């Protein structure tokens, strides 16, 4: 249905905005709706069956997107709309949103290779499909490391952790068939590892969890993301060359606010200086806190200490405990808040289906 929608636009004798850009904007509505649901599933449901589906579908969906930009006659229609956008805006026949749509759709086609020769278009589509497969595998490797890695500890090892984290770690142990009455499990899922790094008083366990968490994608030789990243970089280099750019960074930033890699680096360096100053101030606060408590850390404050002592300083200096805020951010509370805000802003009302 998506491709047929686009073919109708390409073969249409009408050349007005609604027949071309309006129709293009509406094309593939079912595909977009299904794609949104599918995207949520594959990014959160890391089951073997879903991984198999994602692996199979990644190159298929990539090639579908490539086809959408290479339907005979379609780009010519889009280019025509782009060429007249300034004139139509000046005459008052288009509004700013229409002119902007013409610009964005045209840029999208060009960046997907619409101006390339036929041989280059095929190579570009092949590169996109291979990248889709590799990037899917890369993400799955990270998710698999999060799923497989576990640190089995006891209730005593959970010292300093709030009750909701202790309860979640206990449930994770049960779910993973650890039968000991005191067994608890910390995984690399953010909902477990981040609060554990924040509240656990066991420095040795924090270090173990932190080092595993920052090594996702390289915890097993079977899941070697380094080799995948190398292949992706080579493909990106060739992709940039096809588009007349010397580097992928040049190609990627061209359609962003930064415009050039040099501007990106300038911003990052500016932010780095200020971020480092802020981090050093925070470190000084933590070191003062440790001195006042008479504690000394071997090797000083390490990355696996940062969250823990930052939280200790927050509680000591500002009487603020993040764990006390969590009951107000439950799924139901946040859902009701979203409903309420969207009702006030847009007048939307929600009725639960039976």
Image (spheres, rainbow, N blue to C red):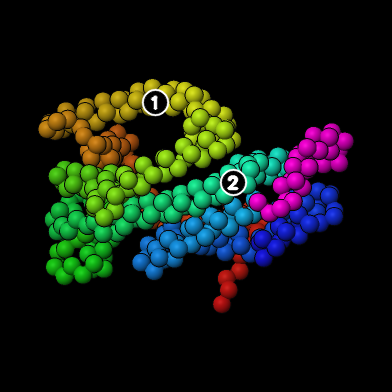
Q: Quadrant of the C terminus?
A: bottom right
Mark 1 neighbour class, 10 Å CA radius: few under 14, some 14 to 19, many 20 or more:
few
Quarter occupied by residue 305: top left
From the image, tell me which residue sits under label 2: 119
Given residues 188 and 223, the one toward you in this image is: 223
Position of 251 with respect to 232 (left or right) is right
Which image quadrant for residue 8? bottom right
Majority SS type along the magenta span: helix
Query: Which label was assigned to residue 44?
Result: none
Along the horizontal axis of the image, is 160 left or right of 78? left
The residue at 32%/28% (across/down) is 279
Which residue shows up at 59% across the image and 46% down it? 119
Nearer-N-terminus badge (1/2): 2
Dot 2: element: helix
Count residues near mark 2 (Cα–Cα under 10 Å), then give few for <14, some for 14-19, many for 20+: few
Q: Is residue 335 above or below residue 114?
A: below
Q: Is residue 329 visible?
A: no
Judging by the rendered image, the residue that carries numbered circle 1 is 272
Residue segment shown in magenta: 70-98
Is residue 29 shown above or below 193? below
CB-based contact (under 8 Å), mark 1 and mark 2:
no
Which residue sits at x=16%, y=63%? Answer: 183
The x and y percentages for residue 273 are 38, 22
Q: How many marks?
A: 2
- Spatial distance from mark 1 to mark 2, Cα to Cα? 43 Å
The percent position of residue 55, horizontal first and vertical second, equals: 43, 61
Q: Nearer the viewer, residue 156 or 130?
A: 130
Give the residue at x 24% y 36%: 303
Instruction: Confirm whether the magenta stretch covers residue 62.
Output: no
Q: In terms of image quadrants, where is residue 314?
A: top left
């Amino acid at each position: 249905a998506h491709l047929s929608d686009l073919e109708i636009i390409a073969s249409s004798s009408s050349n007005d905005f609604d027949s071309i850009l309006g129709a293009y904007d509406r094309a593939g509505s079912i595909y977009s709706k299904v794609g949104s649901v599918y995207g949520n599933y594959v990014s959160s449901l890391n089951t073997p069956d879903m991984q198999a589906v994602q692996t199979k579908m990644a190159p298929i969906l990539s090639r579908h997107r490539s086809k959408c930009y290479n339907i005979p006659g379609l780009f010519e229609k889009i280019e025509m709309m782009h060429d007249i956008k300034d004139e139509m805006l000046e005459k008052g026949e288009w509004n700013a949103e229409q002119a902007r749509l013409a610009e964005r759709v045209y840029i999208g086609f060009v960046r997907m290779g619409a101006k390339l020769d036929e041989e280059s278009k095929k190579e570009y589509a092949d590169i996109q499909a291979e990248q889709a497969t590799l990037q899917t595998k890369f993400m799955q490797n990270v998710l698999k490391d999060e799923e497989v890695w576990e640190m089995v500890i006891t209730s005593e090892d959970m010292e300093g952790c709030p009750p909701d984290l202790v309860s979640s770690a206990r449930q994770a142990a049960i779910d993973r068939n650890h039968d000991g009455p005191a067994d608890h499990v910390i995984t690399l899922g953010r909902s477990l590892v981040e609060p554990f790094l924040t509240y656990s008083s066991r420095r040795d366990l924090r270090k173990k969890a932190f080092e595993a968490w920052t090594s996702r994608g390289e915890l097993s030789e079977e899941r070697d993301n380094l080799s995948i990243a190398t292949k992706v970089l080579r493909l990106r280099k060739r992709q940039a060359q096809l588009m007349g750019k010397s580097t992928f960074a040049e190609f990627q930033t061209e359609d962003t606010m930064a415009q050039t890699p040099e501007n990106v680096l300038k911003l990052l360096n500016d932010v780095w200086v200020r971020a480092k100053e802020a981090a050093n101030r925070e470190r000084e606060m933590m070191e003062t806190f440790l001195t006042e408590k008479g504690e000394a850390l071997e090797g000083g404050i390490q990355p696996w200490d940062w969250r823990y002592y930052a939280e200790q300083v927050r509680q000591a200096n500002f009487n603020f405990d993040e764990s006390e805020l969590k009951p107000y951010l439950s799924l139901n509370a946040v859902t009701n808040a979203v409903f309420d805000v969207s009702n006030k802003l847009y007048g939307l009302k929600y009725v639960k289906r039976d």
